[in-house]
Image (cartoon, helix red, strand yellow):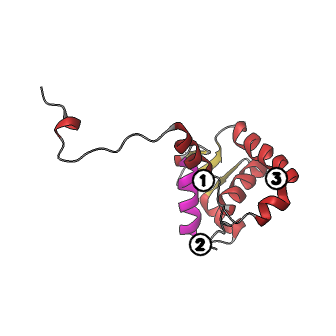
Amino acid sequence: MSNAVTDAPFALADPPTREALLAKYFRGLGDPTRLTILRLLQQEGELAAGEIVERLGLPQATVSTHLGCLRWCGFVVTRRRQRSILYRMAEARVMELITLADGLLDDNEDHVRSCSVISDSRSTR
């Protein structure tokens, strides 16, 4: 019996390490717009994409891209209401993680601000 992976004419990369996956997961939170969306959903509970666009004053395509990222990583979930897709926080641990990071930032803000190793990720508004 043939194995599609071993018989493939190309080599598959080794799977990423747990640390690499965790770093990638954190990059999902590494954008100011995505953090703003999460805080907005925390305050409002559930919003349609159009409502998020209106509140943030950003182009619909930009917001949709960020919402797609947040959904793919499991930070938000959706449900349909007639013709609208509503977004809400996937679970309380998402905001617990952000709140914990906020507290750590309080203790290290000057160092983070002056860090030259990690770039200052600015959202394209």
Residue that badge 1 annotates: 27
Classify 37 as above or below 60: above
Q: Please report the residue visible at 71 percent of the width from the left and 37 percent of the height from the top.
A: 93
Measured as percent of width and height from the top left, residue 74 is found at 57, 42
- Classify residue 109 by image quadrant: bottom right
Q: Is residue 99 left or right of residue 30?
A: right
- Classify residue 95 by image quadrant: top right
**Residue 84 visible somewhere in the drawing:** no
Range covered by the magenta-colored residues: 59-71
Element at badge 2? loop
Q: Which mark is residue 47?
A: none
Q: Toward the viewer: 99 or 58?
A: 99
- Classify residue 37 by image quadrant: bottom right
Q: Is residue 14 left or right of residue 16?
A: left
Q: Toward the viewer: 119 or 101?
A: 119
Look at the image and say whether residue 102 sits in the magenta stretch.
Answer: no
Q: Nearer the viewer, mark 2 or mark 3?
A: 3
Q: CA distance from mark 1 to mark 2?
A: 22 Å
Magenta stretch prevailing secondary structure: helix
Q: Which mark is residue 105?
A: 3
Residue that badge 2 annotates: 59
Element at badge 3? helix
